[in-house]
Amino acid sequence: MHHFVPHRIRETMRPFFAYGIVDGVKPGQGGRARLAVMTLADQTRSDTDVLIAGGGFAGLTLAIALRRALGSSFAVTVADPALDKSHAGDERASAIVAAARRLFEALGVWQRVADEAQPILDMVVTDSRLNDAVRPVFLSFGGEIEPGEPFAHMVENRLLVDALESKARDCGVELLAGAVKAISPPPASGPRIVATLADGGAIAARLLVAADGARSTIRQSAGIATHGWNYGQSAIAINVEHERDHGGRAEEHFLPAGPFAILPLKGRRSSIVWTEHTQEAERIAALPDEAFHAELERRFKLHLGEIQVIGTRRVHPLGFFVARSFIAERIALVGDAAHVIHPIAGQGLNMGLKDAAALAEVIVDAARLGLDPGAADVLDRYQRWRRFDTMAMGLATDGLNRLFSNRSDVLRLARDVGLGMVERLPALKRFFVREAAGLTGQTPKLLRGQLP
Ligand SMILES: Cc1cc2nc3c(=O)[nH]c(=O)nc-3n(C[C@H](O)[C@H](O)[C@H](O)COP(=O)(O)OP(=O)(O)OC[C@H]3O[C@@H](n4cnc5c(N)ncnc54)[C@H](O)[C@@H]3O)c2cc1C
């Protein structure tokens, strides 16, 4: 339901309370304790240039990029109910490819997580049945795209989100702990869109960015449909401790039910993304510890010695969808709000960062010329840039999953011949590695390590 709150009458609304951060807070002052209670009346305006709904990876990255490039005269607000919640206990980790690392370096965020980031030094891919005693390696590569530059790093999500949040605060991004509940379209190409927050307050912005994840409220409120499908597969995500060092090696075992990935974390720990048909994933995840461990060991094997699960088991249903449009009037979609892909190639978050970098670049180009960042031609440029690339990556990961997640011997032969060819042709292999590291195609400046 849309509640239209005209910009002009905002001043007459009763003040609402929100947790917010005021510009000018000194860098490095404590974490969430710094949250100050603000009222709408305290703010010099309830308008902002860009309002970002969602303070996950994509939303916070965009916010920092805009402030770093455009300075304090350009107001950026991020609203997310999770902003006043602790991420402690969330053990998920992500592979941050080289291009994304360059982006975080350019934004001054990487420095805050570098010590905790585990480089992927080497990667092996196998294609086997569950009970095969030996898993022949079909594809392997050293993990460097340039000397001294690893293809990817594994970083725990909570460390990265915390680093992004504190950097955003240091850059003067206004952070509001609250959900965007509804939007009111601008009256006949008006200059601002109005977003209503969960606590009843309203904010008017020249551009509203939906960075609110796969179930995006903004996307639905704007009436943007998606196309895609469910895979009938779910991923069990867990972390394990093991006796021996992983040596920075990542492993992806293509088993008939789906990929089983072992990704190295700092210390003798690894993050596991374990794909099964959904019913089987739910059955396995609900098993008592001993039986769960037995299922895990059948897939993990014993090459790193004894293993032990740390933290909780999480099950994520897997699907693929792309929004029919990445833009609407004064609205742009980024990250999982715009697309969700299979985690088979660990690219979902990296694609969201590419959206954030591309959108930052078109906004910055417009703002520097004194143009409206929410104007239709600015948003068109963003959509043209990102939608095709997203479809290409989405369909590539979909194809990979279809090729690998099945029991067909014919397909098995075909893929093994294919992987064998890639393994034997260094130029082709180098191309795939650079592609996976996000270094091919029309790369936004940030992903080349430059501010827009
Ligand atoms: C098992 C698994 C493994 C994965 N591994 C990888 C990997 O190795 N590498 C990789 O690149 N990707 C990986 N991904 C994908 C990656 O996790 C997502 O693509 C990424 O988290 C999306 O980031 P985001 O910022 O778009 O959305 P999210 O991280 O979902 O953030 C959305 C934010 O919006 C907030 N929000 C929600 N509703 C509202 C609202 N109404 N108003 C305001 N805020 C709101 C939420 O609180 C949240 O903070 C994996 C995914 C899965 C399922």
Image (cartoon, rainbow, N blue to C red):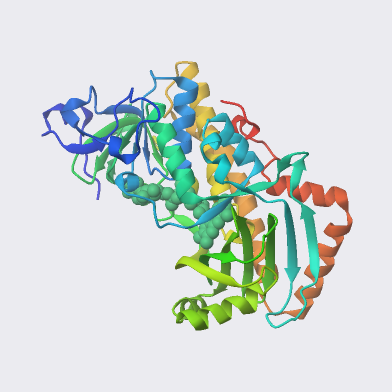
Vertical comparison of 244 with 381: above or below? below
Q: Nearer the viewer, residue 364 or 116?
A: 116
Quadrant (top left/top right/bottom left/bottom right) for the C terminus? top right
**In front: 346, or 396?**
346
Q: Position of residue 386 (x, y in %)?
A: 57, 41
Q: Which residue lies furthest to the right in this view?
A: 424
* Residue 404 left/right relative to 273: right
Q: Image height check: is 452 above or below 438?
A: above
Residue placed furthest toward the front: 243
Q: Nearer the viewer, residue 425 or 387?
A: 425
- Place of residue 240 in the rendered image (x, y in percent of width and height, measured from the top left): 55, 65
Residue 214 in view of the camera: yes
**Relative height, residue 250 to residue 145 (above, below):** below
Residue 122: image location, x then y, percent: 74, 54
State which quadrant residue 42 falls in.
top left
- Residue at the spot 39% in from the left edge and 19% down from the top edge: 72
Residue at (34, 35) in percent of width and height: 30
Q: In this view, does 390 lie to the left or right of 36?
A: right
* x then y, percent, for residue 243: 63, 66
Whether residue 222 is visible: no
Is 386 rendered above or below residue 336? above
Query: Which residue is depicted at the point 33% across and 44% down?
Result: 83
Residue drawn at x 52%, y 63% is 319
